[in-house]
């Protein structure tokens, strides 16, 4: 069964096209990754899926129902973890979860039971009577998730849920996403952290400038660039003397990214150009520390498709 | 309906869990009322500082000045013609009475000269003094006419007038006009404070937008109208409690008699409270930030209160402004209160209440429409 079906979806803000005629389908039981840099149109897309934003063109069906016609019914089956923490600082953790769950029709002892379960799931059971203002950033993010899952939604939309938190909380959240999926929820997971998407998503769509530029399993996306070599050259000095445009003129080079300590180059797999790259760098007095042939990842896929980094 | 109850209960819980909210919502408006009471009470009881310039030095002007001295509310001072303007500017005198040089003579010739009264504080300040002087002059003029121009007859009549012995029984009566004026002006300020409360209405919703809880509520199966209505209900509850507290303090702490039954006052202010809440809702529906909402509140509240007669009687304004004042709800609320103070029946002000209700309905409709436009959320996601 299709959990979400999007056809020809378009959204404009004035002259800016935030989402440009996208179509995609998400199957029930998937963890679907929506990957793209800031401003790619990910949040606008999920806001239209949840019915918070109107569409200029196209249509969305959730669980086979048209969102324009059945908005409230669809909302009952969606849990949303917004990018920014959306909780009341003046309510305790339990009160927060209970209030939001009550808006989905839960009441009485069932409401309390589900709220406590959600806090347990988020690892906050021992903090149920604590006000969130005393929480760390990671704990607040986990409460943000608990508020979205107490009503046991069939579709959970997580919009960059790991932004700005420590590794421990991040790992906890990623494990939680997998666990929620195993419990039967379909997940839409947006992020600009490609490692997270690689780790948990069964399928991925890459967005850029409002368009879906690639879609498939992580393996399928990787195969788009398996005829390429990814070369990471660690440098000690001389980064300011390197011109990305000049390196791109070397035969076989597809994309280049230079920062203070690393030069990342994608080249066609069938062209040998390592000697010319090394020669270019040494002629400009760049001190090379290490050369590594990297396995391509989603970052490389994005870089190859757009010529830009995901975090631009 | 359940959602409205849940949202209302939650807003009240979140708002009043902070103790500072009690200060913002109840103590500050009461403090404002206290200040306005103090201002109006002081202007209402102080003696009038009257400067006297007597160029006449005749018998009538001297006698009139003597008679003014017996009146408690006038504090008389003899003033020089070259210094009275500075005394008025420095606020050491409220007004100056100038008797012309031929005042007594003009009376006797049957063509009384005009006494000049100079003030910088408006006609309201000197109206009682003018009335007293006019009354005294009219009495003397009657004697002049009765004497038929014969001086010996007039002297006799005037002497008798001055020496008449009357048995006086003094009784202090309550100056209802002054009390009503104090109550009326305080109510003007009260309306302003009720409107300032609308800033808090806006702040509750804007805080929800800032904290993104608004976004989470809207992603739940809650209709925009339910959200708007729950906020309106919450604020109406707060405004009604504020109004009850303000009426209680005015009535039982400051002992001000408004000359309007408490329940009638509550109904009128309650209707006005609806408008105040609706204005807050409109502001928040259009404002993108607390700064914008604050600026919009000030831009709406102060000019409409000025125009509506909250700071001064609307009757003092130019004719065009008086007509324009009927486009602001304050005027209708104050007119209703004034009519009841003058003894009108409550059924006489039902029209005013209908107008207030129409104002509120129109404003609520605008805010609901604005909230219903989903793309309004876009800026907050």
Image (spheres, coloured by chain):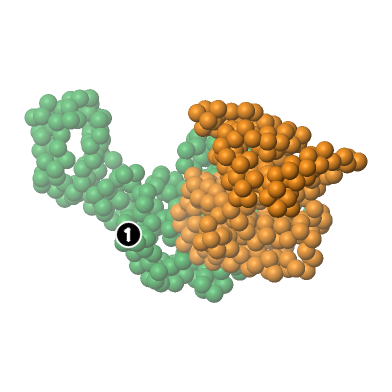
Chain colours: A green, B orange
Give whichever of B301, B282 is nearer the camera: B301
Residue at the disc numbered 1: A16
- Please identify the quarter of the rendering in which residue A105 is found: bottom right
Report the quarter where the C terminus of chain A lies. top left
Q: How many marks?
A: 1
Q: Quick one: label 1, few (<14), some, or many (20+) residues within 10 Å?
A: few
Please name the residue shown 53% across and 30% down the image. Answer: B81
Please name the residue shown 34% across and 44% down the image. Answer: A311
Up-down relation of residue B333 to residue A200 (above or below):
below
Please name the residue shown 30% across and 51% down the image. Answer: A301
The residue tagged with tag 1: helix, strand or loop? strand
Image location of residue A41, percent across then percent down: 38, 56
The subunit letter for the residue under badge 1 reads: A
- Please identify the quarter of the rendering in which residue B119 is found: top right
Give whichever of B108, B212 is nearer the camera: B108
Please name the residue shown 88% across and 41% down the image. Answer: B166
* Residue A222 showing in the rendered view: yes
Image location of residue A307, percent across then percent down: 24, 49
* Residue B34 showing in the rendered view: no
Image location of residue A203, percent across then percent down: 43, 58
Horizontal side, residue A281 vs residue A33: left or right: left
Image location of residue B9, percent across then percent down: 72, 53
- Please identify the quarter of the rendering in which residue A264 is found: top left
């Amino acid at each position: 069964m299709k959990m979400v079906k999007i056809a020809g979806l378009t959204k404009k803000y004035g002259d800016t096209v935030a989402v440009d005629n996208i179509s995609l389908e998400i199957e029930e039981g998937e963890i679907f990754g929506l990957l793209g840099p800031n401003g790619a149109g990910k949040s606008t897309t999920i806001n239209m899926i949840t019915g918070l934003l109107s569409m200029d063109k196209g249509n969305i069906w959730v669980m086979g129902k048209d969102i324009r016609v059945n908005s409230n019914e669809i909302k009952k089956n969606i849990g949303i973890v917004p990018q920014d923490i959306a909780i009341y600082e003046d309510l305790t953790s339990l009160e927060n979860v209970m209030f939001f769950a009550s808006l989905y029709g839960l009441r009485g002892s069932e409401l309390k039971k589900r709220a406590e379960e959600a806090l347990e799931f988020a690892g906050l059971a021992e903090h149920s009577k604590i006000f969130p203002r005393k929480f760390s950033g990671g704990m607040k993010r986990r409460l943000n998730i608990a508020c979205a899952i107490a009503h046991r939604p069939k579709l959970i939309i997580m919009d960059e849920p790991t932004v700005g938190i420590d590794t421990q909380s991040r790992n906890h959240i990623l494990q939680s996403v997998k666990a929620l999926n195993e419990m039967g929820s379909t997940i839409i997971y947006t992020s600009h952290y490609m490692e997270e998407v690689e780790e948990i998503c069964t399928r991925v769509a890459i967005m850029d400038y409002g368009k879906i530029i690639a879609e498939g399993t992580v393996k399928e996306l990787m195969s788009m660039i398996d005829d390429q070599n990814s070369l990471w050259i660690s440098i000690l000095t001389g980064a300011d003397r390197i011109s990305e445009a000049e390196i791109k003129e070397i035969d076989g080079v597809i994309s280049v990214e230079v920062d203070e300590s690393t030069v990342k180059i994608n080249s066609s797999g069938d062209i040998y150009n390592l000697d010319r790259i090394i020669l270019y760098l040494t002629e400009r007095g760049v001190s090379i520390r290490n050369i590594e042939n990297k396995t391509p990842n989603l970052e490389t896929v994005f870089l190859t498709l757009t010529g830009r980094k995901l975090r631009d | 309906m359940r959602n409205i109850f849940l949202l209302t209960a939650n807003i009240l819980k979140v708002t009043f869990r902070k103790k500072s909210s009690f200060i913002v919502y109840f103590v500050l408006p009461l403090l404002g009322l206290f200040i306005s009471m103090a201002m109006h009470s002081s202007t209402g009881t102080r003696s009038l500082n009257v400067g006297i310039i007597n160029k006449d030095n005749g018998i009538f002007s001297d006698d009139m000045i003597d008679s003014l001295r017996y009146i408690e509310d006038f504090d008389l001072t003899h003033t020089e013609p070259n210094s009275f303007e500075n005394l008025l500017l420095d606020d050491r005198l409220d007004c100056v009475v100038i008797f012309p040089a031929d005042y007594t003579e003009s009376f006797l010739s049957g063509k009384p000269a005009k006494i000049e009264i100079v003030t910088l504080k408006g006609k309201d300040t000197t109206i009682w003094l003018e009335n007293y002087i006019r009354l005294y002059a009219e009495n003397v003029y009657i004697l002049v006419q009765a004497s038929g121009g014969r001086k010996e007859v007039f002297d006799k009549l005037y002497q008798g007038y001055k020496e008449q012995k009357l048995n006086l029984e003094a009784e202090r009566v309550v100056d209802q006009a002054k009390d009503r004026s104090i109550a009326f002006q305080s109510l003007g300020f009260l309306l302003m404070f009720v409107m300032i409360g609308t800033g808090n209405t806006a702040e509750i919703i804007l805080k929800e937008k800032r904290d993104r809880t608004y976004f989470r509520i809207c992603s739940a199966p809650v209709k925009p109208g339910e959200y708007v209505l729950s906020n309106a209900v919450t604020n109406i509850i707060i405004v009604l409690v504020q109004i009850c507290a303000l009426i209680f303090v005015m009535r039982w702490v400051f002992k001000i008699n408004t000359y309007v039954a408490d329940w009638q006052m509550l109904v009128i202010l309650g209707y006005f409270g609806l408008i105040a809440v609706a204005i807050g809702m409109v502001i928040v529906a259009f404002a993108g930030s607390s700064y914008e909402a604050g600026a919009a509140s000030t831009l709406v509240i102060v000019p409409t209160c000025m125009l509506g007669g909250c700071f001064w009687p609307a009757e003092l304004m130019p004719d065009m402004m008086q007509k324009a004042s009927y486009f602001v709800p304050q005027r209708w609320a104050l007119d209703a209160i004034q009519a009841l103070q003058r003894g009108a029946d409550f059924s006489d002000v039902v029209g005013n209440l209908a107008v207030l209700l129409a104002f509120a309905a129109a404003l609520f409709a605008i805010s609901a429409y604005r909230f219903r436009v989903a793309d309004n959320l876009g800026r907050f996601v």
